[in-house]
């Protein structure tokens, strides 16, 4: 299925990193020939109450805290500028929410009627992680993460793609969701992280290669050792060493509780995407 309808969720401030990520997301949407809808959330932000000096009550706090709002319109302004500079069909919406806790669900619900969400991600940012997790689990659609910290350096062509494969349902779903991107890639690598290369792992990897070949995708299969590291860190190292443009992986092979307590590949990658990352569950 071709990717024709994309959601770009925006929240926060239009700093240089965020603007660079917005621009790259718009370019990717344009290259895919898709319509991209920017949904900017305007959230109320509590401001520390001012101190009032009065003859009656020294250092009295104001009875009500003053408030401000995040710069949703600034983000949309950056989106409009990017859309004008590239051949892309675009729409924009703004939504006001009363509580920060409402933001992830708002984005997830909006994503349900799209083919894909392009999500700018701040490194090691709890709000970004909550948004991505909610969109993965509650939208029913894949999420393509754009790391803000190196957005200006990201390729907009997914020529070198790594598919993290462990024969689980989330991994299979991610492969299916990524097919339109894999079909255009020049180099597709199916990679299984393991310290014990078993016959069943080899057979599974080769079976995936045959499946991809039916879609005209010529891929290779390999296993990489974990050697006491974490799977997420192993993936990061592979991406960097092989100049991978896009990592495709399923979310949460283990229970979400175990991921939170012990960490895991999903948590590591969401916390700091090493490149463009397409994730499904």
Image (cartoon, rainbow, N blue to C red):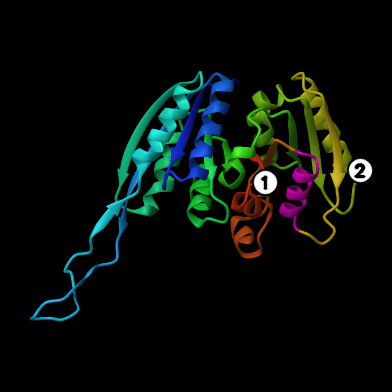
Q: How many marks?
A: 2
Q: Which callout, 2 or 1, points to the residue nearer the camera?
A: 1
Q: Residue at x 74, y 20 (%)?
A: 215
**Magenta region, main secondary structure:** helix
Q: Report the quarter where the C terminus lies.
A: top right
In the rendered image, the vertical position of residue 264 relative to residue 235, given as above or below = below
- Splitting the image into 4 quarters, where does residue 28 fall? top right
211 above or below 249?
above
Q: Residues within 10 Å of mark 1 (few under 14, many from 20)?
A: many
Residue beneath label 1, please?
A: 274
Q: Which residue is located at x 72 percent, y 43 percent?
A: 168
Please state which of residues 128 and 157 is positioned toward the viewer in this rendering: 157
Distance between mark 2 and mark 1 Cα atoms = 30 Å
In the image shown, does 203 or 92 lie closer to the viewer?
92
Q: Earlier in the sequence, mark 2 or mark 1?
A: 2
Give yes or no for residue 239 being in the magenta stretch: yes
Where is residue 132 drawn, in percent x and y? 53, 46
Answer yes or no: is residue 140 visible. no
| Side of 232 where 92 appears, left or right | left
Q: Which residue reaches farthest left?
A: 56
Magenta-tinted stretch? 230-243
In this picture, is 123 found above or below 280?
A: below
Image point 85% across, 58% down: which residue?
Answer: 227
Residue 199 visible at all:
yes
- In terms of secondary structure, where does tag 1 sit? loop
Magenta stretch containing residue 28, yes or no?
A: no
Secondary structure at numbered mark 2 = helix
* Numbered label attached to residue 223: none
Location of residue 73 in the rendering, given as x and y in whole percent from the top left corner: 34, 38
The residue under label 2 is: 199
Residue 199 left/right relative to 60: right
Where residue 229 sits in the image (x, y, percent)?
78, 60
């Amino acid at each position: 299925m071709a990717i024709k309808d994309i959601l770009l969720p925006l929240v926060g401030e239009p700093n240089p990193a965020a603007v660079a990520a917005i621009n790259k997301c718009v370019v990717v949407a344009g290259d895919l020939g898709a319509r991209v809808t920017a949904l900017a959330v305007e959230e109320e932000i509590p401001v520390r109450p001012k101190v009032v000096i009065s003859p009656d009550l020294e250092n009295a706090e104001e009875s009500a805290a003053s408030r401000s709002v995040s710069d949703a319109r600034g983000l949309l302004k950056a989106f409009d500028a990017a859309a004008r500079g590239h051949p892309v069909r675009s729409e924009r919406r703004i939504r006001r929410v009363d509580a920060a806790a409402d933001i992830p669900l708002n984005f997830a619900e909006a994503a349900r009627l799209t083919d894909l969400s392009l999500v700018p991600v701040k490194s090691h940012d709890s709000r970004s992680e909550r948004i991505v997790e909610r969109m993965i689990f509650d939208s029913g659609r894949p999420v393509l993460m754009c790391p803000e910290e190196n957005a200006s350096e990201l390729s907009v062509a997914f020529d070198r793609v790594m598919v993290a494969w462990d024969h689980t349902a989330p991994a299979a779903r991610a492969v299916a969701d990524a097919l339109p991107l894999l079909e255009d890639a020049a180099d597709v690598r199916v990679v299984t992280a393991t310290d014990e290369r078993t016959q069943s792992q080899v057979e599974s990897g080769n079976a995936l290669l045959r499946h991809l070949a039916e879609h005209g995708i010529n891929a290779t299969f390999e296993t990489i050792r974990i050697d006491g590291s974490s799977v997420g860190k192993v993936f990061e190292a592979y991406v960097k060493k092989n100049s991978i443009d896009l990592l495709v992986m399923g979310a949460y092979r283990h229970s979400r509780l175990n991921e939170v307590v012990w960490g895991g590949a999903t948590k590591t990658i969401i916390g700091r995407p090493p490149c463009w990352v397409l994730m499904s569950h």
